[in-house]
Every structure is written in structure tokens, then in C-alpha cells.
Amino acid sequence: MNTKAPKRIRITKPGRLTRSRGEKISAVEGLALTPRMRTLLDATKDKSGEERRQLIRAQFAQKTA
């Protein structure tokens, strides 16, 4: 029996964890964004990571009534 070993593919550059990939992973784990966080993330879509983190911290620092 003459079988060839499968050709191995070498991944030299790992894929980026994008928002859509993160949401798919979270969905498998049963996690979902709250409407409040989805609104905040949509509003800060074009901002840098540090600016987004500051806005998220500010959002949670506010007291909810």
C-alpha cells in the first residue's frame, strides 16, 4: 500500500482577532454583548484602542440609577 503523507501547511503569520471573530467565539461560549456595550462599541468604531478603553471605563464609572 503506497500512501503519501499529507502536505503540512506552515502558518507563518497568525490571523488577527477581529471584532467579528471575537463575537463568533463568544457566541459559541454563550456570551453576548449587552445593548449598552454594543452601542458604545459601535460609536467608537473608528477610534484607537486606548480611546475606546477610556470611554468604556468612563461608562462603567458612571453610577447607574
Image (cartoon, rainbow, N blue to C red):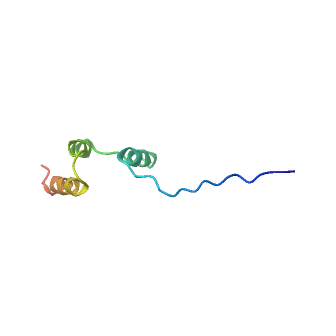
- Residue in view at x 74 percent, y 54 percent: 5
Q: Is residue 36 above or below residue 56?
A: above
Name the one closer to the observer, 8 or 63.
8
Q: In this view, does 14 lie to the left or right of 44?
A: right
Rendered location of residue 58, percent (x, y)? 15, 55
Name the one closer to the observer, 14 or 23.
14
Q: Is residue 53 left or right of residue 18?
A: left
Rendered location of residue 3, percent (x, y)? 80, 51
Q: Residue 8 appears in which quarter of the rendering? A: bottom right
Rendered location of residue 9, percent (x, y)? 60, 53
Count of numbered labels shown in the rendering: 0
- Residue in view at x 40 percent, y 52 percent: 17
Rendered location of residue 60, percent (x, y)? 18, 55
